[in-house]
Image (spheres, rainbow, N blue to C red):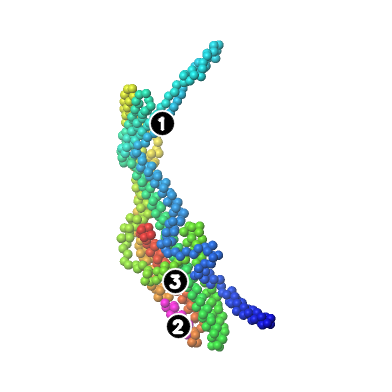
Amino acid sequence: MNQVKRSLSLKILLLLVTGIIPNLVIETSVLSQDKIQNTVNAKPQKRDRDRSKTVVLKLPDLVQLVVQNNRELKNNSLNRIIATQELEEAESKFSPTITPSFSVSADRSLESSSNFDSTEVEDSSDFDDFNDTNFSRSLQIGADLLTPLGTDISLTTDPLADFDVLGLQIRQPLMRGAGTKVNRVSVQSARLNNTSQMLERQQSLVDKIVEAIKAYRTLILAQESVKIQRNSLQSRRKDLEAQTALVEAGRRARVDLVQQKASVAEAERQLLNTFNELAQAKSDLLNIIDTNKTLDIVVPDESIEALTNENLPQPVKLSKENLLQKAYAQRPDYLQAKIDVNTTRLDLIEQRDNLRWQLDTVSSIDVGDDIRASAALEFTQTFGDKSPKTALLSSRVNLLQQRSNLEETKQTVAVEISDRIRDINSNFAQVQEARQATKLAQERLKVVRELYLRGRDGIGIFEVTSQQDEVVAAQNTELNIVIDYLNAWTDLEQSSGMTLNIW
């Protein structure tokens, strides 16, 4: 009985040695990229889940994540809170302000205590000292109002006075500071500055969205390159198996195995490089999302299938005039150039006003136990100060520069629109050619492989491996051209100012 048990144990041990160990040797001989690919396709193990979470993202989901998580965009949103408050402050320029001031005072004469030569000591008490102290209180309420004409109206009163006290003063500029055009400059400038900050935030948002879209397509490119290289490696391994069988059957020379093995090794190296590129693409995308979470981002199959010829946007007749009209109405940089011109015009109004003489009429009336009224004409002018003229000259030059910048921006927009339309048409034609080139390369590979397996003269393993390389190159070229074509559409959307409307 013990002998039977030892015999069974020996057989089991032999099975383990002859079955498991060779399998382990074969598995360890495969390069690590197969394991990496399996982790991409398969669900992560529990240990991997603790380090990273696989997230399948479509492009709209990615854009939403970028808008929500990016710190730069968050900081711009916080700056908008300050800008809104500054605008409210500027627009309250013509709102009345009220300033109450309440005071309580006590005073006492110290003459009796300063006579130190007197030999008589007056008998006094704390109660008498308290009666010698005078208490008073006052409540001053002041109100001030500036009108768009430049009129400054000040009103003061003291409700706690023994008799009614009312003071009214009106100052009206006649030259400098007079008129609604001058007095509304600060409010208009604040509104333009608020709009400018909004446009700056929009421009930052557009740039970040475009950057995220292109990074997402770079991830598609890397992910599909892995698939192309993996399929190529599997095909070459099958060819190596078939060729090994032919060599063992004596139909091919053993030297042909060297070339095929070298081809497999090269395919393994290229696959490893594509995995590195895929990891880098995911890292770049995480930086744009700006999240502290470790995510393994994967592009879904339906998003990749959208790269087929039928689903690509067609370059129908793009109207340059319509695109220019949209760009001039929506592009943040062009609108900012227009705001810069208007802001400089407002500054020029202020500098011209500063050169005028200060001539004001001042009228006041005080109502108390009696009524007093006065009127005056005040003149103020500083002679010898050349800074106002320098500021005026600087403002004029700045206005000319801003107008030139606006015209240059307008021309730049027109050139960009023309370039984007040309890029789309050119890339679409290249997509058609690349797809045809891929089909032809695949057909040639099929023919060359069949001829080689049939033993046709002139067709060696070198021709097979070379044709395999051409197929891989054609597939990668096609994928790159498709991505370039889609990026050209994204650039056109950005150039015409439609990015925010689309997303």
On the rendered structure, is 66 left or right of 330?
A: right
Q: Position of residue 7 (x, y in %)?
A: 66, 82
Say which amino acid is labelled 3.
Thr
Residue that badge 2 annotates: 447
Q: Earlier in the sequence, mark 2 or mark 1?
A: 1
Query: In this rendering, which labeled residue sits more in front, label 2 or label 1?
Result: 1
Image quarter of residue 385: top left
Q: Position of residue 452 (x, y in %)?
A: 49, 84
Give me the disc on residue 477. 3
Residue 490: in magenta span: no
On the rendered structure, is 5 left or right of 311?
A: right
Give me the disc on residue 101. 1
The residue range painted magenta reads 439-451
Say which amino acid is labelled 2.
Val
> Eyeballing the image, is 494 above or below 165?
below
Q: Nearer the viewer, residue 83 or 4?
A: 4
Residue at 33 percent of width and 58 percent of height: 326
> Eyeballing the image, is 410 above or below 478?
above
Q: Position of residue 56 (x, y in %)?
A: 46, 65
Label 2–label 1 contact, CB within 8 A: no
Say which amino acid is labelled 1.
Ser
Secondary structure under tag 2 reads helix
Label 3–label 2 contact, CB within 8 A: no
Residue at 51 percent of width and 77 percent of height: 234
Q: Magenta segment, principal secondary structure?
A: helix
Residue at 42 percent of width and 78 percent of height: 440
Query: In this rendering, which labeled residue sits more in front, label 3 or label 1?
Result: 1
Secondary structure under tag 1 reads strand
